[in-house]
Image (spheres, helix red, strand yellow):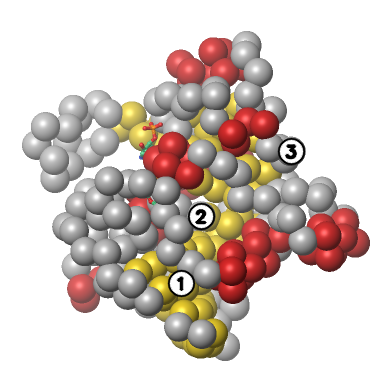
């Protein structure tokens, strides 16, 4: 059974993937896999969220926030008592983000999760509306990368998700990339997946996938999800999975 999720936001991951399971090319250039139908689908998921979470790698590639443009979706949010736009939450332990990105000129709340050492720097300059440091954990000494320093700090996601919920983030849409998603999957904190399978093959062993990270799970311990729906629109297939055994599973 998945762990009880009442202490954290409801977490939905949304990706457009190639037919060979990549979310970008090996240059990590700006990914534009989907059609307008996929774009609309993404916007609908974002419109349901209190916050949108992206890793700094995704922000560096894309350079922009994922906002709700459709006025009907904005009005639906307001009828539900939500602000017009979800908070755009960037996870960046290093805090190394260019303040020149278009992201910072887009009209939506900008939040940053970073190491305690970087908080003052980002609070003292324009850019993010809210800067939070997170509890940190040390990289385990048996991390698979032999060159990785054993004291590499990383986000303690269970407590960070709990703090996000205290900050009013009840529904979190995670838009990538594979590093952040791997960290959330490792603590079984993903409730739903929306994957749009797009009709292209990218290839490349270094091209990013929906779940990267240092180590995966052994096949017999893989987390299970129930297929809620599979819808074909043109040449794209929209897949919706829900964590097996969760309240959302049917
Ligand atoms: N097709 C799609 O739907 C889609 C969606 C999103 C992204 N993408 C693609 O995915 C690629 C980016 O993937 P990525 O893996 O580089 O990026 P990512 O997961 O977005 O970001 C990686 C960054 O997150 C931070 N980080 C590292 N460990 C972390 C942890 N445990 N928890 C939270 N944050 C942590 C680090 O930031 P610092 O370096 O700042 O410390 C790291 O550089 C791009 O090619 C992008 O186009 C595709």
> Does any atom of ligand 1 lie closer than 8 Å to the CB of label 3?
no
Residue 107, numbered circle? 3
Position of the N terminus, as image quadrant, is bottom left
Tell me how far mark 1 sits from mark 3, CA to CA.
27 Å
Kindly state the secondary structure of the residue where label 1 is placed. Answer: strand
Relative vertical location of residue 167 with respect to residue 228 in this rendering, above or below: above
Q: Does the residue labelled 2 lie within 8 Å of ligand 1?
A: yes
Ligand number 1: quarter of image: top left
Label of residue 34 in the image: none
Quick one: SS at disc 3? loop
- Residue farthest toward the right in the current orientation of the protein: 79
Q: Which of marks 1 and 3 is nearer the N terminus?
A: 3
Lower sequence index among marks 2 and 1: 2
Residue 89 location, x and y as percent?
Answer: 58, 41
Identify whether 120 is placed above or below 181: above
The one nearer the camera, 158 or 144, is 144
Residue found at x 9% / y 37%: 146
Q: Crowding near pointer 2: few (<14 within 10 Å), some, many (20+)?
A: many
Reading the image, the residue beneath label 2 is 175
The quarter in which the C terminus is drawn is bottom right
* Disc ID at residue 195: 1
Which residue lies at the image location 48% right of the left edge and 18% below the top edge? 118
Residue 233: where, in percent of width, then height?
Answer: 54, 85
């Amino acid at each position: 059974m998945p762990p009880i999720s009442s202490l954290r936001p409801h977490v939905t991951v949304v990706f457009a993937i190639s037919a060979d399971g990549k979310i970008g090319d090996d240059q990590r250039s700006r990914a534009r896999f989907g059609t307008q139908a996929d774009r609309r689908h993404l916007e609908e998921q974002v419109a349901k969220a209190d916050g949108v979470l992206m890793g700094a790698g995704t922000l560096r590639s894309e350079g922009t926030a994922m906002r709700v443009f459709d006025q009907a979706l904005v009005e639906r949010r307001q009828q539900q008592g939500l602000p017009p736009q979800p908070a755009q939450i960037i996870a960046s332990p290093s805090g190394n983000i260019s303040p020149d990105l278009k992201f910072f000129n887009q009209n939506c709340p900008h939040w940053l999760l970073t190491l305690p050492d970087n908080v003052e720097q980002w609070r003292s300059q324009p850019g993010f509306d809210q800067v939070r440091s997170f509890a940190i954990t040390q990289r385990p000494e048996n991390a698979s990368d032999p060159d990785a320093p054993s004291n590499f700090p990383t986000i303690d996601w269970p407590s960070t998700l709990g703090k996000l919920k205290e900050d009013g983030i009840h529904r979190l849409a995670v838009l990538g990339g594979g590093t952040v998603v791997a960290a959330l999957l490792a603590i079984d904190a993903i409730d739903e997946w929306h994957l749009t399978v797009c009709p292209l093959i990218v290839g490349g062993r270094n091209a990013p996938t929906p779940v990267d990270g240092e180590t995966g799970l052994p096949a017999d311990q893989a987390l299970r999800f129930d297929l809620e729906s599979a819808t074909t629109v043109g040449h794209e297939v929209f897949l919706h999975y829900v964590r097996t055994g969760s309240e959302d599973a049917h």
